[in-house]
Amino acid sequence: MENVHLADEDDLYSGYDYNPAFDTESEGNPVCGARSVRSPSACFVFQMTAKFPGTSTGGRPVGTSFGLRNPMASSLGRPMTGAVQDGAARPMTAVRAAGYSSTMARGSTFDPLGQSKGAAPPLESRNDDTPEEKIKILEKKVNDLIEESCMAQSRGDMQLALDKAKEAGRKERALVRQREQTGTADHINLDLTYSVLFNLATQYANNDMFPEALNTYQVIVKNKMFSNAGRLKVNMGNIYFKQKNYPKAIKFYRMALDQISNAHKEMRIKIMQNIGVVFIRMGQYSDAITSFEHIMSESPNIRTGFNLILCYYAVGDRDKMKKAFQKLISVPLGIDDEEKYIPPNDDPHTNLVLEAIKNDQLHQMERERKALAEKFIMTSAKLIAPAIESSFAAGFDWCVEMVKSSPYVELANDLEINKAITYLRQRDFNQAVETLKMFEKKDSRVKSAASTNLSFLYFLEKDYEQADRYADLAMMADRYNPAALVNKGNTLWVRGDHEKAAEFYKEALRNDASCTEGLYNLGLTYKRLGRPEEALDCFLKLHAILRNSAQVMYQLASLYEMLEDPTQAIEWLMQLISVTPTDPRVLAKLGELYDSEGDKSQAFQYYCESFRYSPSSIEVIEWLGAYYIDTQFCEKAIQYFERATLIQPTQVKWHLMVASCYRRSGNYQKALDTYKDIHRKFPENIECLRFLVRLCTDMDLKEVQDYATKLKKVEKMKEMREQRVKSGREGSSRSRRDGSASSGESTLTYIRVLCVCDSGQSSHGTSAKGERLSAKLRALPGSNEPYETSRQQVLDASYVDPLGPQLERPKTAARKRNEDDEFADEELGDDLLPE
């Protein structure tokens, strides 16, 4: 083997040397049988060493008969495999390590992985400057823009979606021009063009740009190269429907219907449903009935059945209303039974699977479909019940019987409760109560609902004992019913047990955190208990749920006023008038708060707005009249006080203010006439007689003696009355001292009437209204002094001049909501179960 070498990487034939044993030419034999590979005339002796590293023959001697060996006898003259040459046996391939040989080839190195060749050549870089590559890049950009437009629409950003769609349209047109320039117009991507135009039309429609959307749809429909583009006429019909162009909408719906084959049954049904809805909008109920009847015969669904009942109700066909209702309750929903989600055994794996699918999207969709079906059935029953029979009660009974024989058996009890609610709307409380009492022996859910409504009814009738009784029954049937707990709290509230009422409201909130009635009542309870901070917390939480509730905003303003934070109170009242801008009480309250802050101009503005919406509010009239007197515009104050005389004609105070305004404005004759008119209406009024004496004296009128005589007579009568009252009081005091202790304890000498105000108000607030209605009046000037004098003269202990030069204007307050009077209407959210 000394002549056998490993194949060198540079010379594929380096392992094979010339052997004279195979040289046949030297013997004159012309047969080309086994020439050496070095011979220029070699025929079939080839080097089989692979040039790829890691193969079975790479870098080692060949273990086949192609190697040179000692001459052995064979038919072809080739040596046998494994022959020994020069005393060295040829190693077997199967028992030698790859890449290893004890006899290394001359000049070879151990490199089984072929790493001596160096790194692989780099990949050829793609040339982006070719027209085809530019076209591909542009197509990708167009597709990306379409996708971005759709994603923006899904997020609700319609303007961005439209901008992206327009940009995609511009780039797609540039792409078409580039293909035409390169001579590849035959390879224009029609699907891409269709996608761009369709998305652009959709975004136009979403942005209410209906003319542009219709033009884009026309481009698609008129292009014959787009297959099935006629279906887009449905979208065009939808746009005409939004524009209330109903004849054109029907035209395009029918054109789309003609271009859709019968194989697409569901699509045809939906288009026919659209046609029926358009006919309803046009008032063509007979045509709508034709469309809906065809749908109900081919592929019935809940929505179409409901629309069909509406059409029959519109035309007044009783028999067909009944038949349509029967079809409606027999429509299959195609949803699984709820029992499927009940664990059948204690298998933990099965329970985990059921727990996972109990609230998945499919089950949510099934629940929504079932809720929609129940809503349509309930609405249909309430609609047709008064029309299909002679009375609504008989109609409800028929509907209940039909529902009981349908898959919606559980709706029968709800229909009975709606029957009772209908009695309530008709003010037939006795029938409503009788209907609800039938549920006392039903299952717990229905019993709880009926008892809750009965408690509500008795509460409205102020029969608090029965209301409490049925609230207890409702809680016994279902302790987790928040409406029953709220009603129980209400009955305790009216009895004055506010602490216990608050506990029931809290329990209702623990059972249902979204129970707004319980949260509102809890806030009022805290307010009544004198805990404004806790009440404020409740109403702030409620405001987060009911953002535009006027009552909640008013309560927040009232609480901040109790907490002596007028700035926050004004801020909440400003939010309130943004919701109810015409509420005169809120406007007057804003005027009062600004007046207390010293901002007279803002107070005047809001009092004027309040007067504009409610010109009969005495408090607002009094404030405005006093404001004009302060600003020395007595003529303008006259119109307000004259209105007060119309509202309260028996109050002499307003008549005297009108006369005094005339006197201060210099119109003495009008003032005299006014005082005379007051004297005719109130002949025993001392103040009026004094002004008459004064004016007649200054004007040298003959009636002065008559008025002076009347004045003395009236004053004498007043003194006599006061003396009698005084002696009566002294006698009663003496009898109390002489009487026994027991009789003295049991006898009430007088009753002091308290004005019960809100629990958070201070003591001065309780008398504020009385102070406003009895303004501080100034004394008349002396007989020889001008009317403009500022010196006071007290003529009588019970009278002062109502309009002196330094009149102190009374600070009025807007009428507050009285929780005691408006308990059932405003403060308590007495619950009626949702229909």
Image (tube, rainbow, N blue to C red):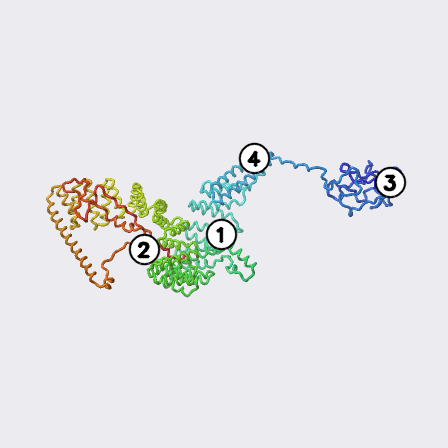
Q: Amino acid at mark 2?
A: Asp
> Is 334 left, or right, of 395 in this rendering?
right
The residue where tag 2 is placed is: 820
Q: Residue 269, labelled with which disc?
A: 1
Q: Which residue is mark 4?
A: 178
Judged from the image, the secondary structure of the residue bearing numbered disc 3 is helix
Q: Earlier in the sequence, mark 1 or mark 4?
A: 4
Q: Nearer the viewer, residue 564 or 348?
A: 564
The mark nearer the N terminus, 3 or 1, is 3
Looking at the image, is mark 3 or mark 2 earlier in the sequence?
Answer: 3
- Mark toward the viewer: 1 or 2: 2
Between residues 340 and 265, which one lies in front from this camera angle?
Answer: 340
Label 4 – label 3 distance at C-alpha: 74 Å
Q: Mark 2 or mark 4: which is in front?
A: 2
> For numbered disc 2, what is the local secondary structure?
loop
Q: Indicate the amino acid at tag 4.
A: Gln
Looking at the image, is mark 1 or mark 2 earlier in the sequence?
1
Q: CA distance from mark 3 to mark 1?
A: 95 Å
